[in-house]
Every structure is written in C-alpha cells, then in structure tokens.
Image (cartoon, grey):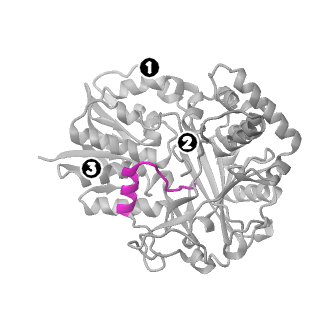
Amino acid sequence: MKKNVVIIGAGPAGLSAAYKLLKESKNYNVIILEASRDIGGISKTVKYKGNRMDIGGHRFFTKDKRVLKFWKEVMPIQSKPAFDYLKLGRNVKVNVKGLDPEKNEDVMLVRNRLSRIYYLNKFFDYPISLKWQTFKNLGLVRTIKSGFSYLKSMVIKKKEDSLENFYINRFGKTLYSLFFEKYTEKLWGRTPKEISADWGAQRVKGLSIIVVLKDTLSKIFNIKRKKIETSLIEEFYYPKYGPGHFWETVAKKVENMGGKLIKNSKVTKINFKDDKILSVETTSGIYKADIFISSMPLKDLINSLNGNQEISNDIIRIANGLPYRDFVTVGLLVDKLKIKNETNIKTLGNIIPDCWIYVQDESVKLLRIQIFNNWSPYMLEDPYKNVWIGAEYTCSKEDKLWNMSDKNTKKFVVSELEKIGIIESSSVQDYHVERIEKAYPSYFDTYSEIDTLVNYIDKLSNLYCVGRNGQHRYNNMDHSIITSFEAVNNIIKGISDKSNIWNVNTEKEYHETKK
C-alpha cells in the first residue's frame, strides 16, 4: 500500500522533494500545500506587463552532481545562443543535444557572469583584479592601511563570538570597515557585533572581492597563503524566463507523475500525538498523511503544533525569537541608464553588462541593483527599447519602507538611484513593487539556541524540515535542494537519523567557487 506524503511549501525545497520522491519510487502519494498562489517561493518569477522580475537574483550553479542532473532533466541546456548573444556575436558554450531558445520555451540558458561593486562613486571589479584602476579607485592610503591592518589580523586574533570578529580575524579591521561593516548593517539591520559568526563561516569565507584583495596584499607583503577561495563563477545556467519558469516546470512534472499541488492552502494547525504528526489543517482543508516534509518557517511550524503534550515555554520562546529580514524589490522600466558602459563587453543598447551591482554607498539604503536584460533577454517585452532593473532592499515589516504606498516607494527608490548616478528620474516609464516576508533567515537573537529547537523537532519521527526557512539557514538554492534530496533518501531507505539533512551547508565554506 502506498504511503501518503504531505509537503508544506511549493518553493525549491518542497518541489525538489516532491519530484525526487515520485521519480525514485512508486510507493508514495504526494500532496504539496502552498500558502500563496505562486510557485517557487522567493525563487519565483514575477510577471508584469510583459516583463519579468527575478526576486533576489538566482544563478543556477552547483558543485553537486545530483542537483546538476536534476536541473538538466527538467530543462535541457541551450543548443544555440540566446537572442542577445546571437545578435551581438558573443560566444557561449552550448549543448548540441539541447534546445534552441529562439524556438523552445523550456530551455536553460548559459550566461556569462559579471557583477561589480559600486563604492566611492566608482566601479570595482568583482573579484578585484590586480590592475592599476583598482588601486587608483581604492587609493594608496587605503591600500597601505589595509595591508598593515591585515598583517595585524594574522598575528592578533579576536575571540570569534560575533560576525564582526569573524571578519576582522580574516581580513583586518580596515578591510572590514571598508567592505563589510556598513553593507552588513544595511542587509541585516544590525551591527555585525550582534550577529553570530556562523553566518560568516557559512557564507562569507570565500567572498571573492576580499580574498583576492587579501591575495594582493599577501603578495605585496610577501606572505604565504593557501590557495585562494572565490565565490565567483564565469558562467551560470539560467532558465529562459527566470527561476520561476524552472519551478513552474518542475510543478507540472510533479503533477504529471501523479502528485497534487494545492495553492492558497496556508497551514493553520499541525496535529501530533506522542512522536508523530497526524494531520495538518489549512485554509483549504485537513490533510492526513504518513510522512510530512516542511519548508515553512521554523517559527510558524512551532506555533502551529497542536498535540497531546504541552510544548514548553522555552521552545516557544526560541521559535518566536528567530529573526528574519523581509525583502522589498522595485522593478523600474527605464528607456536608458545614466551610467555608461565603459567595459569592452557587448550588450544590446550598450548598457552596462552587470547581472547585479552591489551598492556599498552608505548614503543610500539600496543594497543591490539587478539588470534583468543581462540575466536573460527574454525577461523583457522589448530588450532593444528598454532597460528593466530591480532595486533591492531588506527591512522589517515595522520599517517605514515596508509600509510605504507603492507610489511613494517608487519615488524613494528613484531618488536613491538618481543620487548615486544610475538613472535620471525622467527616464522612468513604469514600475512594480514586490514585498516578500521572511525572505532571509537571520543569525541573531535566539538563533544561538537553535540546536535546542532542532532537537525538539527531530523527536517528531515522521517530520522532515528542509530548505532555507524550513531550517532557518541562509542557504543557496542548491543547498535547499540538497536538503530535500537527503530527506527523500532517508524516507525511501527508512533512515531515522536526520543529522544528514541538517548538516547540509555546514562545512564552513561557500559552495560557489570559481572553476
């Protein structure tokens, strides 16, 4: 007899679990419950008047062969260049057995990657290259101060009890102040003094702009270092119509294999007895099952539990204290950018070739700018006529930015972009605002006690927590997929120990390394 499986959430983790389970075994009935009307979670693609927005920017890159195989199964790699590369004569790797993106919809593009940092009203290569322009931008005094500060950090180590000390121990006080401190405060709304060093260990160890600069300083001061780690790649895969296109395709394949997807089905209560989940109550009905896979936020999971034993106040306190950053992204359709393309990279309309730009400027709240034209030309209704950009901010729901009207949000964003010289307000033709709750799990407040929460949850033998919010871990997309693959492997093989699921992305390094 088949076992019934309920999966909470139709984001990357939930959909990957459903796909893998149905692909690997015929012994399960699968239902996915999605609280919203959208597919893909934060990896969804927003459609607006013929243009598409990628929420947060999602490069498809992984070192895990299982994930790569999964991507290629769902969406074949292009056999010919995409529209813009074709027109411009730009070279790109193709798969002769793949699909032509000009003639097919469900196809994965191969894109060249360029991202830069905007700092001191100048562009810095990402990673920093060893050329005169870099030192000219940074300035001789800053370079020298950075070098001596780095030397000091190699000799005098601080207790690694905060993200600030994590950075300083590796990069020195000066580099920390230049490239981490203020940007981190904008991102998390907290000083790095208040954030756990775990975030740095998990995501920042290989941050290229700094490790390459460290290598430069090491050469200048004749310091022997280990092989450079970088977080960059030169190429990445990208679905023709953005990441949501991929996950919508996965959802269709899940349904074709017999799975069910129910949208607008928000979990309101999870019923359990002793060590087992019995059912989940949602806005669309009650669902019983033998196995439950959850990608809903841990805070919401704990607050939904309703069982024959009382949950301790301590567990509830830890869950309710887990912090998140909410996300606001504003799409702006402009007829041109004020900032010029001074690279030798060809683009349609000769716009700057960046996928995204990190904004270090302390005078604005803006974190990052996406240029959707450069992700995929198919993200725009007319890539010749317009430039479609995304301005990204993090905040909390209590902040002024979150509670502004769309019209005032647009005015604010345009004023910031104009201030730093990216656009002129007169060039804006249209806009669209998206707000995402609990986009980024954060590493402060009760996060330091999360192991207590995990131990409690793991006592529920038929519950598996996966994904970014499901584990309260700032995972890359491939890490979230891997947590689901590990969970499915445990389910099929009857493995009760869940430590392999929780141990994904705890190896103290960033997975996106340069080939």
Q: Earlier in the sequence, mark 3 or mark 1?
A: 3
Name the residue type under label 3: Leu
Q: Given the image, on which type of amino acid does mark 1 rest?
A: Asn
| Secondary structure of residue under mark 1 | helix
Residue 104 appears anywhere in the view: yes
Read off the residue under disc 2: 440
Give the residue type that dot 2 points to: Tyr
Marks 2 and 1 sit apart, C-alpha to C-alpha, by 25 Å
> Circle 3 sits in a helix, a strand or a loop, which is it?
helix
- Foreground tag (3 vs 1): 3
Q: Earlier in the sequence, mark 2 or mark 1?
A: 1
Image position, residue 247 (x, y; %): 42, 59
* Mark 2 surroundings: few (<14), some (14-19) or many (≥20) residues within 10 A: many
Badge 3 density bin: few <14, some 14–19, many ≥20, Cα 10 Å: many
**N-terminal-most mark, 2 or 3:** 3
Q: x and y percent of residue 361 in the render?
A: 78, 47
Q: Which residues are magenta?
A: 57-74
Whole-number angstrom distance, CA of label 2 to CA of label 3: 27 Å
Q: Among all residues in the image, which is located at the extreme left?
A: 1
Describe the element under mark 2 as helix, strand or loop.
strand
Circle 3 is placed at which residue position? 21
**Residue that mark 1 sits on:** 313
Q: Which mark is residue 244?
A: none
Viewer-nearest residue: 239 or 434:
239
Please tell me how crowded label 1 is: few (under 14), some (14-19), or many (20+) other residues with Cα within 10 Å: few
**Would you say residue 186 is visible in this rendering?**
no
Residue positioned 36% across, 30% down in the render: 499
